[in-house]
Image (cartoon, grey):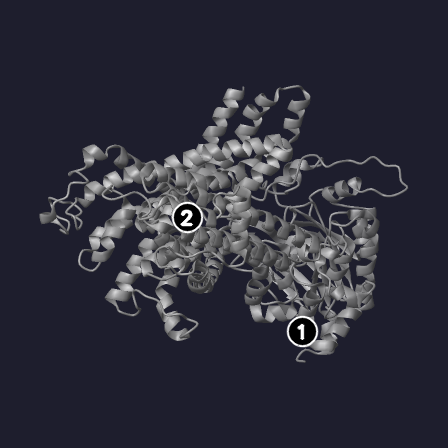
Amino acid sequence: MPNRFLAQVGQTALVLFFVSVASFVFLKLAPGDPVSLMLGSDYNKDSYDRLFTELGLDRPWMVQYTTWLGNFVTGDWGRSFVSNEDIFRLAVMQALPVTLCLAAYAMVLALLVGIPAGVLSALKRDTWMDLCATGVAVFGNAFPSFYLGIVLIWVFGVGLGWFPTLGFVAPWEDPLEGLWYLTLPAITLAAWYIGLIARVTRASLLDVLGHSYILAARARGEGATRVVWVHAMRNVLMPLTTTLGLQLGGMLRGAVMTEVVFALPGLGMMITAATLNREYTVVQAGVMLSGLLFVLVNLMVDQLYTWLDPRLRRLA
Amino acid sequence: MPMATRRSALAEGWSAVWAQRSARWGMGIVLAYVLAALFAPWLATHDPVHQAVEASMQPPSAAHWLGTDSFGQDIYSRLLYGARLALAIGFGSVLLGMVAGVALGLLAGLAGGRTEWAIMRVVDGLLAFPELILAMAFLAVLGPGVDNLVYALALSFVGPFARTVRSDVLQVRAQPYVEAARLMGVPMREIVVRHVLLNVAPGIVVQAGIRVSIAILLESGLSFLGVGVAPPTPDWGLMIAEGRAFITMAPWIAGIPGVALAILLVALNLLADGLRDALDPRSGEAR
Amino acid sequence: MDHPAVAEEDVPLLSLQAFSLARGKVDVLDNVAFELGRGQTIGLIGESGAGKSTIALAIIGLLRPPEVALRGSIRFDGVELTGLAEAQYRQLRGNRIGLVFQDATAALNPCFTVGAQLAEPLSRHLGLRGNERRQRSIELLESVGIGEAALRLDAFPHELSGGMQQRVMIAMALACDPQLLIADEPTSALDVTIQAQIMELILERVRARSASAIFVLHDLALAAQVCDRVVVLYAGQVVEVAPAGELFAAPRHPYTRALRACSIELGQEQVLAPIPGSVPGLEDLPAGCRFAPRCDRASAQCAQTPPLVSDGIRSVACWHA
């Protein structure tokens, strides 16, 4: 186990290195001269040269990269040209928690709905219930989340008035109000995952139920419900984890769009706004942060998988 | 004989796809969209970018079959041209990403050693970013526009294709018949063309099927966010974004392109699932 | 305690009468009948597809409507099983009827420890908890010859060898001292070197508890060694039932004879005679005697289904026997 873990950590470190290089190169490729951007329209050659040296732009790329990486690691991510806010505060302290809350809420919803739907559809295989669940899964999986968000706002927010349509209340300040505000966005984001989870649960459960250890558990006198939810589902958790890990990109994609539709001040909103404003340092921070998040969550999923599968866990 | 087996393999794959009812539905709907896109100039009733403020936000009528948007543009015509754009960007970006990804994957899988290591680390780096973020960053640098959108999306597809092809190549290379061909002195290039490419083709097709719907989703999503194609280009994502503000007064403005997009995405997914089940059953649900 | 103790001795532990099982339109078992006395062992013999494992699963109630359609009767200790409610059946499974699977590697859940799986019948049927349950688990593992039993309880199945896994399977089937143990080819997935050990172990444990046992086997010679009686199945029908020794010494049904000719005996020079043809598919069975197409003694009469004729000790279903 330690070997496998170390190998994964090594791999992750390597990928993170590439992520940092890519983020750095991105900033170098960005059009426009950072110095003139910072100084505005009105500057002279002298002040230009001074800032140029101050920013270290006269030094070789390697040095610039290490300086930048050092700053990045220590949390010195520069300031926004637009709001003059500290980018680290903006991205990590303000935007990131919003996105994480949204994603966690959506994930819980998706699991709570998707797993029972998948189990039901596997057990009532080829009945109308299965057909319905599969249909909902296919549509949920294909429906663009930004469009679904608009429809949900229209129906539940404007039409029925059950939920607030826009805005955000921090769940860590007011949990109930916060969750209430996050509910429609979380449903929007979860819809896509519900379909995926239901499909994977259905397929894996059907596969697992064909194994003779299921028959063996019943031969010991275990009841059908316990056999499905304990003996079988414990084995379904592994393929489910793999799929969820593989679909992280989809989660982030959905989160960005959902945040914009519901005007949630998360990472997706930050990156979108920065892209529209051509605020490259903020875009870069967002890119780096989402890459970091993506890679770390992948590592966590891998660890979770190893922990879930005893055959890998005790492999010395 | 190789020709015969090749054709029959193709026919076999085709009939395996066709045998699935949901895949047939998907194929039929996608075909309808493709035809609508191809014949958009003949099918359209108005100029898709002709603005007429006096006729803005009209509900569906005889003059404007699906109504007009807030600029008075005909939604039906914009929808047709939007299909053109969505399909062109979707297929174009996947094709571009596929060519680059397949080339990288083949190179990595066949070269092995340090070349393989280096290529795969770059691919890992590409895959480390969520596709939407990668495309957005790229668009931030290049600025909006149809061609930039295609490049940005293609870039985010290179990684998945390269990884699929490489693992397929490694698998094929380990097959006894490839080893036998090598021992018999068949040149590597011929082995690649005859054995490797033919065997990795199903994986590529399946991957492409999955990616096209993601490409169209990303394309419309990026345009919706305002970083994709620029208005007044007829684009579904833009149309939805534009109609969003009027959702209570004129729900058709955002509603109709949204439904069109959703149906196309469902159809593409059904087709992709059919392709996967027919050509690459071992991949199962885990893609 | 409604029934008197005397009657209990008279009633066989298990009896199948005119038992048929259909999956959709296909009859997997047709008119199967045999009895198993208390403390007896019986062997079910036949090629794959003959329906041996189906009988095993049907007895323990894992093949039931609506999945399959049942006709006839299975009586276990005087109780009719075919119509038994699921909740009552559950009281029997793993408690009074134990099942040892063919492939222990596949029959042990990879995600749960040996101890967790072994504990299930102990808590469900015997109500054991905590330390008491653990103690009983250790005893059980020791009784099937597993050393360091306390340590093994916390092991996952993949950490044990195939033979060890089968021993765990046996311990599980015996956990509640069942009256009937069904062993479905318990050694065919194991290395030849430990097959005899495992067979010996099962027999020894069954005899120690004076339980009855059904062995599903495909090797006639092995059946003759370990069973009191042998039931020969062909394409879902019983073709011959006889005491093991007599059956082996003097098979009457041509199919049994053919099986006899294929079985290897150590230290004997013999010509192995494969049976020509193959078992017919259950969808297109020949009319009359199902073995007729492969039988060297088939005649016009064989177009009629031969009845299972008993002489009090042996029964056989063949016009020419």
Q: What element carries label 1?
A: helix
Q: Is A231 or B103 nearer to us in this picture?
A: B103
Quadrant of the rendered structure where residue C176 is?
bottom right
Tell me, for residue C179, which label it has, or none: none
Three-letter residue code for mark 1: Ser
Q: How crowded is mark 1: few (under 14 residues within 10 Å), some or many (20 or more)?
A: some
Q: Mark 1 points at which residue?
A: C123
Distance from Cα at disc 1 to Cα at disc 2: 53 Å
- Return the x and y of residue B92 as percentages of the image width and height: 37, 35
Asked which secondary structure carries label 2, the reply is helix
Q: Position of residue C48 (x, y in %)?
A: 67, 45
Label 2 lies in what chain? Answer: B
- The mark lying in front, picked from 1 and 2, is 2
Q: In which quarter of the image is the N terminus of chain A?
A: bottom right
Residue at the left extreme? B54
Q: Is residue C197 left or right of residue C108?
A: right
Say which quadrant the C terminus of chain A sits in. bottom right
Image position of A280 (left or right of B261): right
Residue type marked 2: Leu
Q: In front here: B91 or C78?
A: B91
Task: State whether residue A206 appears in this view.
Answer: no
Q: Which residue is drawn at 63% across and 63% down?
A: A217
In front here: C240 or C166? C166
Image location (x, y in percent) of residue A95: 42, 61
Label 2 belongs to which residue? B132
Circle 2 Cα neighbour tier, 10 Å, few/some/many (<14 / 14–19 / ≥20): many
Percent position of residue B24, x then y: 37, 40
Query: Which residue in the rendered view is the most extreme toward the right?
Result: C267
User: Is residue A61 visible to the viewer in this orientation of the structure?
Assistant: yes
